[in-house]
Image (cartoon, helix red, strand yellow):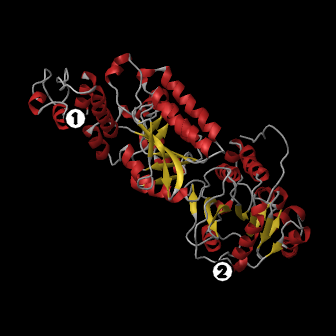
Amino acid sequence: MAALWSNLARRGLRPDAMAARRGWVSSAAATQTTGAWNGAAFSTAPALAPMHPKDAFRKRLEVENELALDGGGARRVAVQHSKGKLTARERLDLLLDPGSFREYDKLKTHRATEFGMADSIIPGDGVVTGHGTIHGRRVFVFSQDFTVMGGSLSETHAQKILKVMEKATQVGAPVIGLNDSGGARIQEGIDALAGYADVFLQNVLSSGVVPQISLIMGPCAGGAVYSPAMTDFVFMTRRTSYMFVTGPDVVKTVTNEEVTQEALGGADTHTTLSGVAHRSFENDIETLRATREFFDYLPLSWKTDGPVVQTEDVRDRVEPSLRHLVPDDANVGYDMCSIINKVVDRNSLFEIMPNAAKNIVTGFARMEGRTVAVIANNPLHLAGCLDIDASVKAARFVRFANAFNIPILTFVDVPGFLPGTDQEHDGIIRHGAKLLFAYAEATVPKVTVITRKAYGGAYDVMSSKHLRGDFNYAWPAAEIAVMGAKGAVEIIFRGGDVEKETLNYTEKFANPLLAAQRGFVDDIIDPAETRVRICEDLELLRSKDLGEVSRKHSNVPL
């Protein structure tokens, strides 16, 4: 009981007042303890009034539950709030439907005894785990509690996380992890490292079985970063979260570089430069609200269909503006998102990685209320060229969609792969092959629309008919060729009348007719009727079944 008393004191609770309130002792007895209250600790607990052992246990259980709910205590909670951060339980309250949370292992504690750990026992051990619902659909969650020993991961902390991850895989429901941790609990040494390795393994075993989402809402450093890195989507909170393998102090020691935590591993860094994170939001509340919205695009597991959302947008909506949005001049840019938004259900596009590799758009949208994965070249940035970052971004997204049976809708306006020594030396061949491999391997319904140009090898890569595209369309202004007319003529007719031959080449090849005659596009369609066609195709393809070659696994060019 003395240990329990000490725990109460460390959290800023008055053990004497609590004992009297719970009926353990009289008010007078509560003030006659041998350990004087000093706002921090008691040396011993007051003598309890005689009671039946079962009643005594019920009283103790009540306090243990309160301790678990209290986390690190009022003082540490106040510090958390002062940084603009919610507590672990407050975050779950906002993420999940009211009253839906069922907690696991609320009273679980660590078993470490070294370095004074026997006197630092808090029920729950720094992570809140369980399951609940988002808009009525099942989800498993864990939320690290920074107010309890900095949210550090111990052996039992890891076991709690593993339990929900394993249960999620067994029943077929997504996992959302709310990360806010200082890293491994140093006092536990290799036991904490083993805990991380166990979590990493389960990330791999769950990959492609159930969606895994990581919310970085505080520090995530060292080896801890590799668990979110192996999940499907990573969202970060600006200014209060960061991710890096080695912190600024180590960087300065090794490389003599001076860098802040924010510049090294903040939300802006990872959503614009590294591509580690997929979205970032201003604060905890916005992050959690966006996660609830995003969750409605995902199936619960690879075995289930995605949700169908009621929509007032009709299939036969014709968009005459699509006939004029794409400039005839191939050198003039335009925002592909404006095209996408006029084809998919209204206001349904949820972009993934909108601030990284802007020359390609990836995101989820809906067609007749059903989720589709959208990939599109964006001529507004780098003329829509495929480069290393765009290839990796899109390849990862295609593979997720294929893993969870989400149809892929591709809009193409690509002049080719980005030239340059930097691209070649950094491996554009290998990285570009990732996107080619992902599209070729995908067995889900694939519908492709060429809006303006599709040149060279990039034409092949962007879900062409040759990569098992189900329906491939071109708009009348589309150009499908090895390269643009001027470049082709300068090679073919060296020293000839370039201007004349360019006109001839344009008339013959700078249109989609030859591709249609070869069957490489299924039809040249009126842009205004694009939505109608795609909706009809997706309905037809719902029963698509493609037999696969028997093998252990493919070898994607990582």
Quarter of the rendering containing residue 10: top left
State the image coordinates of residue 195 (x, y, percent, origin top left).
52, 28
Q: Which residue is situated farthest in the top direction here?
A: 114
Quarter of the rendering containing residue 443: bottom right
Using a 10 Å C-alpha cutoff, classify the residue at mark 2 as few (fewer than 14 neighbours), some (14 to 19) or many (20 or more). some
Closer to viewer: mark 2 or mark 1: 1
- Indicate whether 186 appears above or below 408: above
Using a 10 Å C-alpha cutoff, classify the residue at mark 1 as few (fewer than 14 neighbours), some (14 to 19) or many (20 or more). some
Which amino acid, mark 2?
Answer: Glu
User: Quadrant location of the N terminus?
Assistant: top left
Residue 64, label in figure: none
**Residue beneath disc 2:** 319
Q: Secondary structure at mark 1?
A: loop
Q: Secondary structure at mark 2?
A: loop
State the image coordinates of residue 542 (x, y, percent, origin top left).
75, 63
What residue appears at the point 49 percent right and 37 percent down from the top-left corner?
Answer: 244
- Indicate whether 121 appears above or below 416: above
What residue appears at the point 19 percent right and 31 percent down from the top-left corner?
Answer: 24
Which amino acid, mark 1?
Answer: Gly
Q: Is residue 354 left or right of residue 154?
A: right
**Figure disc tally:** 2
Q: Earlier in the sequence, mark 2 or mark 1?
A: 1
**Residue beneath disc 1:** 12
Q: Is residue 448 left or right of residue 381?
A: right
